[in-house]
Image (tube, rainbow, N blue to C red):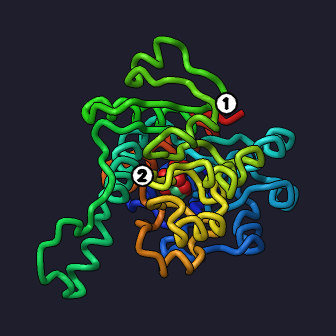
Amino acid sequence: MSKPAILVARAIFPEVLRRLESVFEVESNQDDHLFTPQELIQRLQGKAGALVTGSSRIDGAVLQACPDLRMVANMAVGYDNLDIPAMQAAGVLASNTPDVLTETTADFGWALMMATARRVTEAEHFLRAGKWNKWHYDLMSGADIHGSTLGILGMGRIGQAIARRAQGFGMQVMYHNRSRLSAEQEAQANQAQYVSKETLFRQADHIILVLPYSAASHHAVGEAELAMMKPTATLTNIARGGVVDDHALIVALRERRIAAAGLDVFENEPAFAQDFLTLENVVLTPHIASASVKTRRAMADCAADNLIAGLLNGQAKNPLW
Ligand code: 8YV
């Protein structure tokens, strides 16, 4: 029997590629060329499956143009690039990579939040520019993390892992989410307190965004929310760029209406708003929250396992519908 054909749409660990090649006829993209939507459709012709990342959009047009497609494995926990209702209607299985990246992503959320609050990159730029010539009582003074109030918008697995870490810093944790956690989950998340979105924005000292992106969460943080924040507060985004109105954030940062922001994600990545580069009070990283060596490999293995289970047994390990 011939092997099912698949497309691996982005460069991937060679070991994982070899594992897929033992099961499938694989067309790979180890040059990591970024396919246009039209190129993606061309490459998917005759393919039963695809392993993709957030840069490949699978929507009704793609599904219609690729009638052989039976399964798409997303190498990410977020899946705003997949039109799940359209995939379900077309009978195309979909999977993501939850759990394997939770702790690594939570670690990075903390790294970014702390670098933002304590002005780590701004201080390094200052030093590298040769500007450090004396001690000053106010040199690069930032906001304390310990003893402050952490506000988490989006309290899924990653939000809860971030909350657990707050215990060591003696922080009070408040969160807002589509639904409230159980009392047991709140207790495990450092006694996190469920509050309205407005209370979170008004009262938190450090706000971190970990909510999934959808039409409902588009620009969940815009001018109105930024105006509610304390002028001493920080905002960290490890969710998706579209959750924040970047233009409104740039204005708030420039006018120091909030103290600082830490951004791992942007609207229109990787062509992010260049005005961010003109601001000192922002820490910028290129969408790397899940990027530890161990976790990226686990994500690739998880996506491959899903594709194998979905195409060979008709049931993905981490199905999205
Ligand atoms: C991915 C992510 O690396 O898992 C997610 O949702 O944002 C990252 O871990 C990225 O989306 C590539 O697909």
Question: Residue 52: which quarter of the image?
Answer: bottom right
Q: Quick check: 140 above or below 69?
A: below
What residue is drawn where x is 42% and y is 52%?
Answer: 290
Identify the image quadrant of the C terminus: top right
Seen from this angle, which residue lies furthest left? 134
Q: Secondary structure at mark 1?
A: loop
Identify the residue position indicated by label 1 in the image.
178
Badge 2 amino acid:
Ser
Q: Which of pointers 2 and 1 lies earlier in the amino acid sequence? A: 1
Frontmost residue, 307 versus 176: 176
Q: Are marks 2 and 1 in contact (CB under 8 Å)?
A: no
Q: Residues within 10 Å of mark 1 (few under 14, many from 20)?
A: few
Q: Residue at x 64, y 38 (%)?
A: 198
**Alpha-carbon span between mark 2 and mark 1:** 24 Å
Relative to residue 230, is residue 42 drawn left or right? right
Q: Nearer the viewer, residue 24 or 166?
A: 166
Q: Secondary structure at mark 2?
A: loop
Q: Disc 1 residue type?
A: Arg
Residue 5, image x, y percentages: 64, 56
Mark 2 closeness class: few <14, some 14–19, many ≥20 residues within 10 Å:
many
Question: Residue 20: in sight, yes or no?
Answer: no
Residue drawn 41% across the image and 74% down it: 280
Q: Closer to the camera: disc 2 or disc 1?
A: 1
The quadrant where residue 6 appears: bottom right
Q: Which mark is residue 290?
A: 2
Q: Position of residue 87 (x, y in %)?
A: 79, 44
